[in-house]
Image (cartoon, helix red, strand yellow):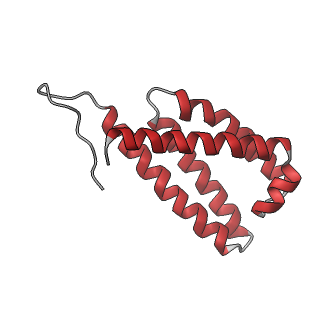
């Protein structure tokens, strides 16, 4: 995957995280219900999303923020597992894999190049 594609994907994750954070914080009842989460838990996740969004969008390096996003996905996956909601569990597991892979790719791309060549890029 090209470096520009990785950065754009990270931008998408940041914008989605910001949007989810706003929705879950401003309207935890309806937004939480739509996601199968109780309002109190939904609001907590929203606040965390709002804290993550600036780092995902503007942080340099970005990979630590993406790794935390993947970790938050695991928290959500466990909540869905506990509530026996397989669709939520599978969805969050998939997002964890995507965000985790993106974090590793961002970390790899953040390393300084050697020998005057362009930095290595993970190819998919």
Residue found 43% across the figure and 29% down from its top: 61
Q: Observer-nearest residue: 77 or 56?
A: 56
Report the residue at 52% width, 39% height from top. 11
The answer to whether one can see residue 68 in this image is no
Whether residue 1 sits left or right of residue 77 in the image: it is left
Write the residue at 81% across / 54% down. 31
Q: Is residue 102 above or below residue 118?
A: below
Quadrant hosting residue 36: bottom right
Q: Residue at x 47, y 58 (%)?
A: 97
Q: Position of residue 60 (x, y in %)?
A: 46, 26
Q: Quadrant of the C terminus?
A: bottom left
Q: Position of residue 121 (x, y in %)?
A: 26, 43
Outermost residue, left direction? 115
Name above or below for residue 12 compared with residue 62.
below
Whole-percent x and y of residue 119? 23, 34
The total of numbered circles placed on residues is: 0
Residue 18 position by quadrant: top right
Q: Is residue 84 visible?
A: yes
Is residue 73 found left or right of 80 in the rendered image? left
Viewer-closest of 102 and 16 = 16
């Amino acid at each position: 995957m090209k470096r520009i594609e990785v950065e754009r994907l990270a931008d998408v994750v940041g914008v989605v995280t910001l949007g989810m954070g706003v929705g879950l914080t401003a309207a935890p009842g309806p937004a939480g219900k739509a996601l199968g989460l109780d309002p109190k838990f939904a609001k907590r996740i929203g606040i965390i999303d709002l804290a993550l969004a600036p780092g995902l969008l503007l942080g340099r390096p970005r990979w630590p923020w993406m790794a935390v996003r993947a970790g938050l996905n695991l928290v959500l996956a466990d909540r869905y597992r506990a509530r026996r909601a397989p669709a939520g569990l599978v969805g969050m597991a998939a997002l964890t894999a995507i965000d985790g892979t993106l974090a590793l790719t961002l970390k790899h791309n953040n390393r300084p190049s050697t020998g005057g060549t362009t930095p290595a890029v993970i190819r998919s």
